[in-house]
Image (cartoon, rainbow, N blue to C red):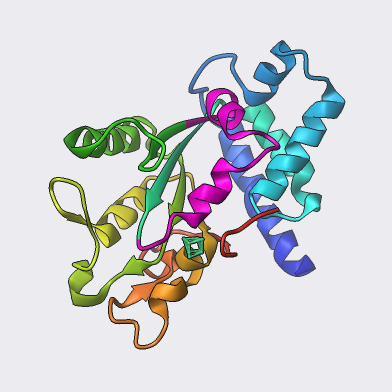
Amino acid sequence: MQKKDESLKKIFSQRLKKLEELPKIDENKSISSILSEEGISRRDFMKWAGAMTAFLGLSSTFTPTVAKAAKLADRLPVIWLHMAECTGCSESLLRTDAPTIDSLIFNYISLEYHETLMAAAGWQAEENLENAIEKYKGRYILMVEGGIPTGNEGSFLTIGGHGKKGKDIAKEASEEAAAIFAIGTCSSFGGIQAAAPNPTGSVGLSKITHKPVINVPGCPPQD
Ligand code: SF4
């Protein structure tokens, strides 16, 4: 586990180094500056970083890394996709209390797409997703909930007016993401959908993209 953490930290520090070189998305509005504008002390900021570390399913030794990322990052654009799942992982997110979901959405991240939480539907929702991928190319965090059906060429899961296959949406969104999280056991390993005889050919997210995926298993993941 320790060895795994060390190699993850190495990857994160390489990513942060690259992030330092990028122009800001929203000038002067890093997460830490928003917190300090709200009168949050350095001590409370570190507490917040600890809570975010736990939210991401990482061990507490990652807290300084998360704090550094918050100092560098603007409100992070997040795209959250739903595949074959029960929405329990989203339910778990909605019940978070440190930070609460409203402060998470309004202060710390910019939730660009989440089918359960957004107001848009149908064509408009599809357009929102395409726009977010284009606008934040290489900058957004992709969170995927649910297993990915690949059987019968992925036709067990189609989404939206164009009937796009879930596996294609997840694959395309993965291509341009800065980091990818598979949220929950379904997305990490296929979950209940992948139980024998697995009629829909469901798999974990890492099986359909060549990009690195951080698995956050649990049903739903918490703490
Ligand atoms: S991991 Fe569990 S809670 Fe999350 S979508 Fe799958 S079945 Fe639902």
Q: Is residue 158 above or below residue 45?
A: below
Question: On the picture, is 218 further left or further right than 167?
Answer: right
What residue is at 37 percent from the left and 53 percent from the top? 82
Query: Is residue 50 at all visible to an observer of this figure?
Result: yes
What residue is at 30 percent from the left and 38 percent from the top? 129
Query: Is residue 180 at all visible to an observer of this figure?
Result: no
Is residue 105 found inside the magenta-colored segment of the image? Answer: yes
User: How many numbered circles are shown?
Assistant: 0
Q: Is residue 151 above or below residue 80?
A: below
From the top left corner, tell me how far across and down residue 182 is, in percent. Answer: 50, 58
Residue furthest to the left: 162
What residue is at 37 percent from the left and 45 percent from the top? 176
Query: Quadrant where the N terminus lies?
Result: bottom right
Q: Is residue 66 above or below residue 76?
A: below
Q: Which residues are magenta?
A: 84-110
Is residue 41 found inside the magenta-colored segment of the image? Answer: no
Residue furthest to the bottom: 197
Question: On the picture, is 176 further left or further right than 77?
Answer: left
From the top left corner, tell me how far across and down residue 161 is, in percent. Answer: 14, 45
97 or 76, which is in the foreground? 97
What residue is at 63 percent from the left and 49 percent from the top? 56
Residue furthest to the right: 43
168 or 101, which is in the foreground? 101
Specify the quadrant of the image occupied by residue 199: bottom left
From the top left corner, tell me how far across and down residue 184 is, in percent. Answer: 53, 61
Question: On the picture, is 79 further left or further right than 170?
Answer: right
From the top left corner, tell me how far across and down residue 154 is, in percent. Answer: 22, 68
